[in-house]
Amino acid sequence: MAARVMMAPLRPKPFNRLQVILQHLKTFKHTDSTADVLLQKKGGAGIITLNRPKVLNALSLRMIQQIYPQLKAWEQDPETFLIIIKGTGEKAFCAGGDVRAIADAIKAGDRMTQDYFREEYTLNNAVGTCKKPYVALIDGITMGGGVGLSVHGHFRVATEKTVFAMPETAIGLFPDVGGGYFLPRLPGKIGYLLALTGFRLKGRDVLKAGIATHFVQSDKLPDLEKDLIALKSPSKENIAELLNSYHKQTKIDQEKEFVLDEHMEKINSIFSANRMEDIVQKLKQDGSPFAMKQLETINKMSPTSLKLTLRQLREGASLSLQEVFTMEYRLSQACMRGHDFYEGVRAVLIDKDQSPRWKPAALEEVSDEFVDSCFKPLGNSDLKL
């Protein structure tokens, strides 16, 4: 009878898991055309395509979790020279975060309400600190979560189809994804108007407001993308040069005056008030059709959201991008604990009766103490970037 030979189990060599993952992601092509997000490498460009056209490319937690590691891998890859992000379909770049899924998670007591905002803001920060040139093609509706994926990057290319807005106060939230950083830094008090009223900017006005860096005709974007991919080892300056050449060739609405030009004096005066009640008072005193329209809009918004938003922008004006995300994470969790976010989603997205019953229902009933409590640190649960 043959003797049995006992073999020692083979020990795997130690390896760095992150290195292996990054190595895999460098060559990774997530190109299943039914996937919610497509991640492809073409030439020296990493291309992110948001691929949920039926829901206007709304950003889900799963999409965030796929984009973030790929973005970090491309950032470290010496063969990737730029990153392009775009949306599928004719209508939207990205109409926002998947707030309906978040509202369902609140109902179910799911921890997704923590994970979603934590991971979304971490991704937004990765866009804002990306070492590789980052080009966002914001063709179509670009709101909320879509703004977070684009506005912090080096280049934002708007088209005649672009519709920009931060409409969160209408659903009991606040203009997050770094709104506390970029909105107060827009010219004059434009950012405060956009944040509090959800005012929509269209086409070339997105450039004139300082949100986009370039304006290119929508049907020229495929050519622009091809030319970006064809650049050999481009620097940020080479990319800017190419974008500038497309921008200069675009004549659409070139002579048109910025939609807010004639109201800038009013906007700067009214929206510089320290308190929400004073902004409302100033709008009433002004009495012009423009002021009355903004007042009518503000009266429909969540009073709690309005007060949180005004303070968010006033504080964010002097904070770093990372400090803003930490502050906004605290606010997001306060909104998840409250009444108005779920009620806003119900009224706007679920029942669609457009008649939210806010609690409290008036600005005067939202106390300074309550607002203070929403900005308080969360201890170990704070977002650290």
Image (spheres, rainbow, N blue to C red):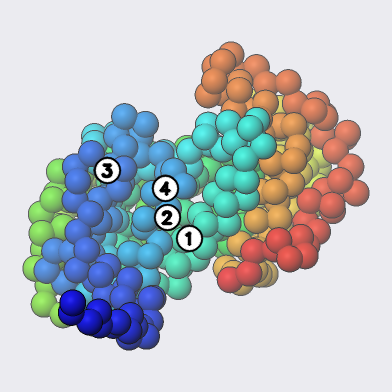
From the top left corner, tell me how far across and down residue 57 is, in percent.
35, 39
Q: Mark 4 points at which residue?
A: 62
Which amino acid type is shown beneath numbered disc 1? Asn
The quarter of the displayed image where residue 238 is located: bottom left
| Residue 11 or residue 88, whichever sits in front | 11
The numbered mark, 3 or 2, whose residue comes first in the sequence reads 3
Question: What amino acid is at disc 2?
Answer: Gln
Specify the quadrant of the image occupied by residue 23.
Answer: bottom left
The residue under label 3 is 35
- Callout 2: SS: helix
Residue ID at (37%, 55%): 66
Label 1 vs label 4: CA separation? Answer: 15 Å
Q: In this view, does 280 lie above or below 311?
A: above
* Labels 3 and 4 touching (C-beta < 8 A): no
Q: Which of marks 2 and 1 is nearer the N terminus?
A: 2
The reply to whether discs 2 and 4 touch (Cβ–Cβ < 8 Å) is: yes
Q: Residue 140's spot in the image, x, y percent? A: 32, 39
Q: How far apart are marks 3 and 2 (CA)?
A: 13 Å
Q: How far is disc 2 from disc 4 in space, using C-alphas?
A: 5 Å
Query: Residue tagged by mark 2?
Result: 65
Q: Nearer the viewer, mark 3 or mark 1?
A: 3
- In this rendering, the answer to whether 210 lies above or below 298 is below
Instruction: Report which residue position mark 1 lands on.
Output: 124
